[in-house]
Image (tube, rainbow, N blue to C red):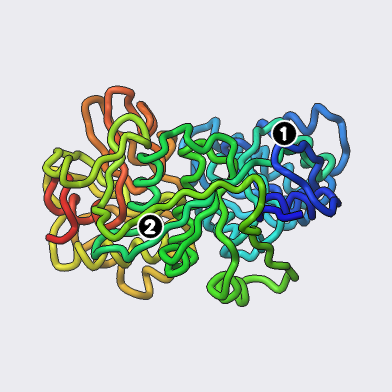
Amino acid sequence: MSMTMAEKIMAKASGKKETKAGEIVIANIDVAMTHDLTGPLSVKSFNKIEVDKVWDPEKIVILFDHQVPADSLDAAQNHIMMREFVEKQDITNFYDVKEGVCHQVLPEKGHIVPGEVVVGTDSHTCTHGALGAFSTGIGSTDMAMVFATGKLWFKIPETIKFDIQGNLKDYVYAKDVILHIIGKIGADGATYKACEFAGETTKKMSVSERMVLCNMAIEMGGKTGLVEPDEKTVNYLKDRTNREYGILKTDLDAESLDTMQIYVDDLEPQIACPHNVDNVKSISEVEGTNIDQVFLGSCTNGRLEDLRTAAKIVKGNQISDKVRMLVIPASREIYLQAMDEGLLRTFAESGALVCNPCCGPCLGGHIGLIGPGEVSLSTSNRNFQGRQGSPDAEVYLSSAAVAAASALKGVITHPRI
């Protein structure tokens, strides 16, 4: 029987020779992740089950990234609760406040390999499909059951393959491609589908760029994002893990496979406008829009490639007096690399504020909130009303290049300046 990559991974995880979309299976979980914001409810729910020990302390990963360092007494108490849980349960993979955003740290530390099932109490867990894993977000109470049993039920999703073809113009990036796709099919256009990204354009992308695509699969309703593993995947993993893995690929004649052609030769930089991610316009339609804050970071675009792109644009220039720019590397590894390359100094000299690796203002729960009437241009993945602070503020989404160019001008600006 021909199967999609999602179906093959689920067959492997459920001990079946084959599965098909729509079937419900009980899958063995390979990696379970939770963080400081959603973890406390998972722990409280686990304690109510009255199970003494988690199913496998080596397959659970706990990180602090959303409110780090603690910005309130509640956050500090949550951190204490999670540290106590880690110690009591002998969790071997614990990353305290210093490491960075969960979706960057997991692949960096070798926790993600192709063909496995990864769950996390965060909707953007789908990021890890860039390495060929079936990775998806779940609720905190579902995570409590995973902690106890190592298993979870799934309805196997159908697959939409986005066959992305063409050569990207200068100043057009993976972020622009995924915003274009979301704008094209809508916020619910891939509801409960596995969103597989393929085609010559995807093959040319680095693993970091593929993470951008998969990260935002959830913004069109996707259950997971996926990219077939290739030589780039293997090279990324070789110095990060010694775990064995197999490479699974979609059969082109799989019954549940639907293919959509995406052509990007003529694509301009794309902007998601308030207050929905699928409210996407070409930059030519919104150039000149006044902004108050620029946020360069998040699990979408806080990687080294993004920092390099933005630093090249701002180097030798000054951030507009009308704008405050926050630069937040996605992980400590990226922070240190950016420091070695002089990128952080470039940002600081330009007038930007460089912060510790964390989620920052992305979720509206930590540093860098925007106030009533203010406008944020952000490289993150969501622009819902109130997402980054006041419900009377507005958030636009863009690539790192657009963010950097706009920070210099004080208005949304094409990066060809």
Kind of residue indicated by mark 2? Ala
Seen at 76% across and 38% down, the residue is 23
Seen at 64% across and 55% down, the residue is 253
Instruction: Confirm or deny contact between disc 1 and disc 2 (CB under 8 A).
Output: no
Q: Tell me which corner region of the image, top left, top right, bottom left or bottom right, holds residue 36.
A: top right
Quadrant where the N terminus lies?
Answer: bottom right
Quadrant where the C terminus lies?
Answer: bottom left
Crowd class of label 2 (few under 14; some 14 to 19; many from 20; radius 10 Å): many
Whether residue 361 is visible, yes or no, is: yes
Residue 102, label in figure: none
Residue 279 on image: x %, y %: 32, 34
Residue 18 on image: x %, y %: 80, 51
Q: Tell me which corner region of the image, top left, top right, bottom left or bottom right, holds residue 131.
A: bottom right
Kind of residue indicated by mark 1? Asp
Residue 345 on image: x %, y %: 27, 67
Instruction: Tell me if 343 is positioned left or right of 301 in this view.
Output: left
Label 2 sits on residue: 174
Q: Sequence order check: which comes first, mark 1 or mark 2?
A: 1
Residue 142, label in figure: 1
